[in-house]
Structure formats: structure tokens, C-alpha cells
Image: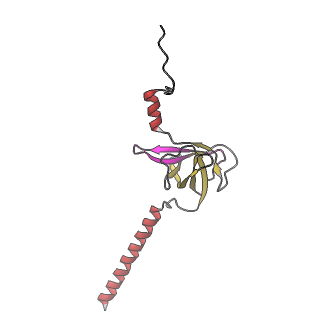
Amino acid sequence: MKQSKLELSVGFFVVLGLAALAWLTLKLGSGSSVGGNTYLMEARFDNAGGLHSGCEIEMAGVRVGRVEAVRFDPQDFSAIATLRIVSTLQLPTDTMASVKTAGLIGDKFVALSPGADATNLKPGSRITMTESAVDLESLIGKMAFGSVNKNQQPTPAAQ
């Protein structure tokens, strides 16, 4: 009798541990580990290259949220990022959102730079001041080939 009670209690704790591990895996995998209450904001970028759902949002090097989604706006051909930000952070209306690269691997994140305006953005509103991702390929191409207009016909040499 004692042996079966012991086996039952050990089995219960093993199942409880597996359930906790599964919950933690789902919580971390969904990117909802920001913690506490959050609210949504939007930011419009001309180029959101490499930014995707789950990317971090940082302010002063501290994680303050995650990118919820990135979608294409066919009206003005831009990318709109939906940002999930911790509710304790109140952003001034002149806050700037920039797409930055973290490390050598090239992981992208959104860096928020607060402004000095006295009024704050309301949840659900849009950050209007944005800085798009740097396109390294075009920068290297401009450096390597200069700003030469390839459609221009060569002029004959002066005689």
C-alpha cells in the first residue's frame, strides 16, 4: 500500500513538472515573456528589412517590448510594424522608432528614442518618426560603383 502511494505521488509530481515545462516553453516561444500588462502601438517604416514577429524592442539598451507583427500597406507601399510595449512605459509623441541590427549575425530589433514632448502617445496610436533598416547591399554597391548613372551614354572623347 505504501509503495503504490509513493509511486502515485512521484507520478503526480512528474506530470506537474512536465506541465510546467510545457507552459514555460509555450510562453517563451510565443514571445510573451515581456511580462506584465502591455499595450499595442504601430510604426510605419519605408524598409523594415529583417524585422519580424518576435523581434525585441529596446529603449536605452533595455528590453521594453516585442514586435507583434509586420505587415505591408499597399496604399503607400510601406511596412507597418505592430509593437507590444510594457504598460509602465509612457512614450512622448515625438518618440522615434528605428530598425537596428544587433551583433554580427544581423538580428534586427526596434530601438525607441524618446523625445521631449510633454504629451504622451495613447495606446493604439502610431509612432510617426521612424528610421528604416539600413540596406547594406545598396550601401556596398554605392561605395563600390559610385553614383554612376548607368543609363547615361558615354560621350565621345574631345578631339
On-image quarter of the N terminus: bottom left
Q: Nearer the viewer, residue 132 or 95?
A: 132
Residue beneath the point at 68% across and 44% down: 117
From the viewer's perspective, is 126 left or right of 159? right
Q: Is residue 87 visible?
A: no
Which image quarter: residue 24?
bottom left
Q: Position of residue 135 (x, y in %)?
A: 48, 39
Residue beneath the point at 38% across and 81% down: 12
Return the residue found at the far right. Answer: 119
Q: Position of residue 49 (x, y in %)?
A: 49, 45
Residue 14 colored magenta?
no
Q: Position of residue 70 (x, y in %)?
A: 54, 53
Return the residue found at the far top. Answer: 159
Q: Position of residue 46 (x, y in %)?
A: 57, 43
Number of numbered callouts drawn: 0
Return the residue found at the far left. Answer: 3
Residue beneath the point at 61% across and 54% down: 41
Picture layout, residue 158 above or below residue 90: above
Q: Nearer the viewer, residue 114 or 55?
A: 55
From the viewer's perspective, is 12 left or right of 119? left
Picture layout, residue 3 above or below residue 19: below
Return the residue found at the far bottom. Answer: 1
Residue beneath the point at 70% across and 46% down: 118
Q: Nearer the viewer, residue 96 or 82?
A: 82
Residue 105 colored magenta?
yes
Picture layout, residue 106 above or below residue 125: above
Q: Find the magenta span and give its range.
A: 86-111
